[in-house]
Image: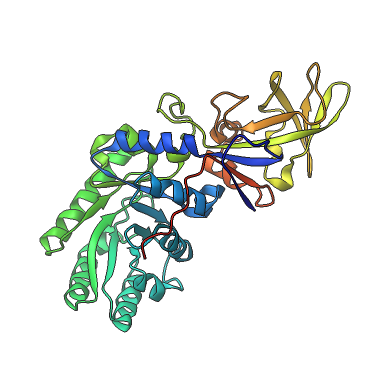
Amino acid sequence: MTELLGGGADQPSPALVIDHAALIDNLRAVRARVAPAELILVVKDDAYGQGLAPIVATAVAEGITWFGVSDLGTALEVRELAGRTARVLAWPAGASDGVDRAVRASIDLGVGDAALLETVAAEARAAGAVARIHLKIDTGLHRNGFRPEDWAETVHRARVLEQSGFLRVVGVWSHIAEASDAEDDAARALFDAAVEQLEAAGMRLELRHLAASAAAFARPEFRYDAVRIGAFCYGVRSAEGPGAGSLGLRPVATLQGTVIAVHDETVTVALGSLDGVPSTLAGRVAVGTPAGPRELLRVDADSLAVLGWPGAAVGDVIAVFGSGMLGERSATTLAEAIGTIGEEILLRVSPRIPRLHRGTAPVASPER
């Protein structure tokens, strides 16, 4: 459920409130930080659970020209939303349904296994189109990708398919573990060797992209031609990493709930584990209230129990994470308390909770 608000209206609750002014500020901060590398804005998983259409509309209005997704269905949605002039990169796992439609829609395809490479070439031949592909080298994370020992054979096969006229290798990419500088340096050396082999084989590469949020910010040598950034654009910092404020970012999403009952020492808030707040957060974090932070005592099936405060009243709004009453606190603050990452907290928010978009860009008709 998505409701588009221009701002200024009373916000119903519970809700995941999406602040597009914060999104715009983050996009500008990220682009300034990684320039001259291109920003590929990652909008997988319904823009990290925040609503694909309004997020893409704001990004297009801000001049974002590259979008990244992990499935072909979302890629086709982004193509419709952003228009034909935008570039959309999808990296499906294996030979997925919809490759034919993706090729016809000029979706760039991240290819990390031999079966998908052959499928893309066959579908492009059948459609009479030229598929744009980005070959993925596995640099150690083992999240899909051609193994280094198979790379020479892959390059040869891709070159043969390219010469058939139905396929172009326009990019090379990988994921890195971001576990340590030493491991990332080793991954980068593998990546550079893979690039050299492609160029030696006659590939005319447009984009080399290796880094996601953390590495793109911390290590300029990892930026190459483009960076794929999702979490940081939404103000979700890395676990145990620098604070969002020090990165020049702020949370885009605020999860809020409403007090529905006041007891002697506690209040009950209409928002619970079935709606995506992990029960393991109880006793580990504070939530934002009109009186300041108060301990989250218990997470029930459809409500929260929060330590009360003087003057607490039914209808008071609390913030589980985000900006506002909590100051600068993203989903990562909660994630660190239970040993996970901020993206997981954000994606756990149930689709039953309305997404309320404040300050959205006008949705123009994209160029087809």
x then y, percent, for residue 99: 40, 73
For residue 31, which quarter of the picture? top left
For residue 291, which quarter of the picture? top right
Q: Is residue 271 above or below residue 296?
A: below
x then y, percent, for residue 102: 39, 70
Q: Residue at x 18, y 75 (%)?
A: 160
Could you say which is closer to the camera, residue 173 or residue 324? 324
Q: Residue at x 26, y 41 (%)?
A: 222
Residue that extends furthest to the top in the rendered view of this protein: 310
Using the rendered image of the protein, determine whether residue 32 is visible from the camera's viewpoint. Answer: yes
Please state if 219 lies on the left or on the right of 246 as rendered.
left
x then y, percent, for residue 51: 55, 51
Please state if 301 lies on the left or on the right of 16 as rendered.
right
Using the rendered image of the protein, determine whether residue 235 is visible from the camera's viewpoint. Answer: no
x then y, percent, for residue 88: 36, 59
Q: Number of marks in the image? A: 0
Residue that extends furthest to the bottom in the rendered view of this protein: 126
Could you say which is closer to the camera, residue 332 or residue 316? 316
For residue 117, which quarter of the picture? bottom left
Could you say which is closer to the camera, residue 284 or residue 37? 37
Task: Give the colour scheme of this rendering.
Answer: rainbow
Location of the C terminus by quadrant is: bottom left
